[in-house]
Image (cartoon, rainbow, N blue to C red):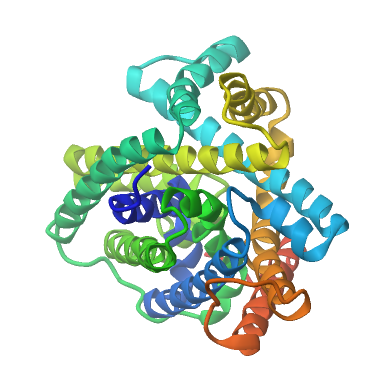
Amino acid sequence: MKAKNGVLGGVLLLGGTCIGAGMLGLPVSTAAAGFYPTIGAFLLVWFFMTCSALAYLEVSLRFKGETNLISIAGRTMGHVPKVIAFGIFVLFLYSLMAAYTSGGTTMLAHIIGFDIKGHFHLFMMAILFAAPFALLVYFGTLWVDRVNQILMFGFITAFIAMCVWAFNSGPAVHINSVGESKYLLFTFPLLVSAFGYQTLIPTLKTYLQEDVRKLRLTIIVGGLLPLLVYAVWELIILNLIPTWGESGLVHMLNSGVNPADAMTDYLTKYGEIFLLFEAWFTFFALTTSFMGVGLGITHFFEDALKFGKTSSHRIILVILTFVPPIFYTLIYPQGFLVALSYAGVFASILLIIYPVLMAWSARYVRKLPGVYQMPGGKILLLLTLLFGVFVIVADIMQQMGVFPIPHV
């Protein structure tokens, strides 16, 4: 596979993995804090997630060939951290896959006008949704890359169309420029998950043939793409939907209704064309994330199980990636709901703390040779580690009801 055309594909794959359907609910969680404090939080999370990605890139490049977080953890920190990472990795990625499978199944049924009645209908619709993406992952990164570029082009087109329509639909509706920043505390675990793409770095390393300059560029630009999209999306929603009041974003946060559904119901007042743009925007956001996470977990299992490139091994990997989320979603959806409620903890451990600790161990303890080192030395590694610990504490305190949550 040639690397010369890989940077654009890598950027779109990385950005598409971040920009999932979960971003639709970001304005609901952050509205009370105000637009400018929220953008500040976006920048802070983007910075440290970029640092963790570069730390992961550093340690990954110290080992030649196809590697993943599990094997790197074993080589840099030992057997116990490797086993812990394996368990958290499986739980985290399967919970994401289950969430995307559930959302995609419902979306597909709505698109084709199919009324799901019972588990059998749900199962068949889930198979219909997941099968094309499973086939793409079976064929490999190049196929996923090409289809992802098409889907990301559709996403960008729908997003631009939605932006133009939104900003020309009328005057602003009470944009909450500066609210109460204390309401950002409980959102950090969600924001970390929204910038979570680090599991794709081993895939990008192989895809770009370990070209350090292009890998670094892909990570930096690819991380800026979701930052820009999230900021504009925040502005659109705060422009169209009031923060407070019976139909406002804070009320949606406390209503128990899916935030994306609640916003869609409110946005019907802006006409069918806007809803059409939003529907395509949601479709492309969900499918690009589903495909990116699926590719990441396939490569994870390939490395963990030491599989080769044979057809039988690829079939097993695809089954391990796509089938369990379907069955668990049908049989025990509560388990994944619990897992998703702690996604910030999982993301912080895997995507921030582990990369920092692995880079520290490889750099200062084992003194392994490498071709790239993240700038900032020990200070930036320690600051990134502290940020990861902060997010874990924030997620736990959120679950305990310690952090303030806005109420109408």
Q: Is residue 19 visible?
A: no
Q: Is residue 209 left or right of residue 235?
A: right
- Is residue 351 shown above or below 332? below
Q: Is residue 241 left or right of residue 401?
A: left
Out of 105 and 210, give the one closest to the viewer: 210
Which residue corresponds to the image point at 59% horizontal and 36% vertical from the top-left?
A: 298
| Relative image position of residue 34 (x, y in whole percent) | 42, 75
- Is residue 141 shown above or below 25? above
Instruction: In the displayed orientation, state which residue is furthest to the left.
Output: 168
Which residue corresponds to the image point at 57% horizontal and 30% vertical from the top-left?
A: 309
Image quadrant where one finds the N terminus: top left
| Relative image position of residue 52 (x, y in whole percent) | 58, 70
Which residue corresponds to the image point at 77% horizontal and 74% vertical from the top-left?
A: 366
Q: Is residue 381 left or right of residue 50?
A: right
| Relative image position of residue 80 (x, y in whole percent) | 87, 57
Q: Is residue 135 visible?
A: yes
Q: How many marks?
A: 0
Dividing the picture into quadrants, the one containing residue 158 is top left
Out of 353 and 5, give the one closest to the viewer: 5
| Relative image position of residue 69 (x, y in whole percent) | 67, 54
- Is residue 400 shown above or below 117? below
Out of 38 and 77, give the one closest to the viewer: 77
Out of 32 and 346, give the one closest to the viewer: 346
